[in-house]
Structures are given as C-alpha cells and as structure tokens.
Amino acid sequence: MTYTLGKMTGSTAHGWAVWSAMAILFLCGVTVLYWAEAKGNPLLPKAVEQQQVGHLQPGGNMEGKEVRFGIAQSALFGTVTTDASCGAISSWFDSYTPLGGMVPLVNIMLSEVIFGGVGSGMYGILVYIVLAVFIAGLMVGRTPEYLGKKIEAYDVKMAMLVSLVFPLIILCLTGISVVRGFGTSSISNAGPHGLTQILYAFVSSAGNNGSAFAGLTVNTLWYDAATGMTMLLGRFFMIIPMLGIAGNLAQKKYVPPSLGTFPVTTPLFTFLLISVILILGALTFFPALSLGPILEHLLMNIGKTF
C-alpha cells in the first residue's frame, strides 16, 4: 500500500518514507515484546527458593505459549497481528509479562497505523501525515502543503476529530467498567492487570482487531452492548471525517512545490511522522497505561502480585 501510494502520487520516495516510519515502529514493538518475554517473571525464581512452585522459567516466560513456536515466534506473531488488525493469536496475551502485554495494546492504540488495518487500509496513517505536515508548516511559518494541496483549518479539524474519537470511546467506557460492579465482576485478576484486561477489550473492539487479552468474561449484557457500540463508533465514525478530508483536498487546486515546501520524502519527514504518531497516539493513552501494565511491571519487580 505504501508503494502504491508512492506510485499514485508520482513520488515513490514518499511511499518509502512512510513505509520506513511503519517499519521502525514495528521493529521497536517486536524488540520490546521479545525482550520482556525472554526476560521472564522475576518472581518465579524467588518462589522456587521458597518452595512455592516446582520449576523455573527456562529461557523466559513460556506460560501461554506453544513450545513449537517459543518466545521469538510468539513475540513476532503477537506484534504482527496487532499491527495489521489480523486478530489471530498464537499465544495468550493475558499470560505475557506486563510490558510484553503492553506492546499489542499500544499497537492497536496507535490506530493500527503500522502497515495498515485489514479492510481499512492506510487512512489511519494518512491522518497522522496530514498532522505532521501541518506541524512542519507551522515550524517554517508557511501554509502547509501535502502533495501539492494546501492543508488548512478544515483538514486539521477533521484529522483531530479522527484522532479524538478513538480514545474518547475507549477511555470513557473503560472508566465506567472499572468503577461499576457490572464491569469489574468479569475480570479474573484484581489490580492493574484487571484494568489492562478491560482496556484491551475496548481497544480491540474499537481498533478493527479481533484479538482478546483473555481473562475477561465479556459475554455479559454490559460488555456485549458496550463493545458492540465501541465497534460501531470506533470502526465507522472515524471514516466519516477522513472522507471529509479526502473530499476537501480533491477540490483544491494543485500548488507546485517551492523552496518553502516541507519535503515528505526525507528521513526528517519519517522522524517527524513517528514523533506525531507517538505524541498523539501513545501519550493520549499514557495515563491508562501507567495505571495498567506499567504499574503492574513496577509492582511485579518489588514482589507484589494479584
């Protein structure tokens, strides 16, 4: 799709620049996930010393993983399936270490812009491209342009609407679920891990994914209704403002590039695009991640379990 973008716009270098941003984010995700799972759970050796369990974790955390796949292939599959909204799994995310389980969660939170979502294509990362070009235009004091079309207030408003619809749905319904009995009664673990289970259910529903964190009983009246509404709003309402951007840009006249035009074919553009994705995507959910997998990781290292 990124190569096709380059061919259709007459700039294959732009397609490769976008692909590079995706590839860097992908490699970071699979590296963190493999590192976390290969490191294993630090509490297990301590439990062995206290004769609470009868075995160690040789080679890392193999709980919830098939022996024929191992940690490396499970980490790769877990990253790919949440990058491209596949939904299939080869290992249980609920059994991952806290930081390992955070990677699939963050991949979907970024609107699955890494190599595009199944059935939704590249529109997710095109929103971030519009915002990145707009920010670059502000830096140089010019009206931002993308592929010869000026990015103006309407386009930025629609792009921000796409970016805000996703976390608004997820965080509101997650917040209701963690403070009401009909939400907390379905979790299998208390504390931050239970929050992660609930958060993942709504993130996966909104993000055109099909995977589950497991450990959460979603076959209840609340979760059936809430996740169904999340799917409707998160998967379809985000497309409406994106179509508005496309229609508005199509009506504008082509403006030839000049010395003040920010190039979208350079490593600098790739770096800026990654920065915008992380700032708008990841930081929006950072408070929730801090109370979920990050807090669980810190508590795990001091011996606290749930």
Image (tube, rainbow, N blue to C red):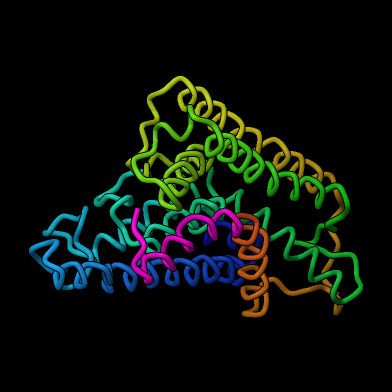
Between 33 and 121, which is closer to the camera in this rendering? Answer: 33
Query: Does residue 119 appear in the picture of this structure?
Result: no
The part of the image, by quadrant, that contains residue 305 is bottom left
Would residue 186 be counted in the magenta stretch? no
Percent coordinates x, y for residue 34 in the rendering:
32, 69
Would residue 296 be counted in the magenta stretch? yes
- How many tags in the picture? 0
Q: Residue at x 48, y 32 (%)?
A: 183
Query: Does residue 277 appear in the picture of this structure?
Result: yes
Q: Is residue 170 left or right of residue 223?
A: right
Q: Is residue 99 left or right of residue 236?
A: left
Between 158 and 190, which is closer to the camera in this rendering? Answer: 190
Percent coordinates x, y for residue 41 in the rendering:
27, 67
Tell which residue pokes out farthest to the top in this image: 221
Q: Residue at x 45, y 72 (%)?
A: 28
Percent coordinates x, y for residue 227 in the rendering:
50, 30
Percent coordinates x, y for residue 173 in the rendering:
58, 35
Between 292 and 200, which is closer to the camera in this rendering? Answer: 292
Between 25 and 164, which is closer to the camera in this rendering? Answer: 164
The part of the image, by quadrant, that contains residue 180 is top right
Q: Residue at x 84, y 69 (%)?
A: 137
Q: Which residues are magenta?
A: 286-306
Identify the main secondary structure in magenta.
helix
Tell which residue pokes out farthest to the left in this image: 54
Q: Looking at the picture, does residue 129 appear above or below residue 230?
A: below
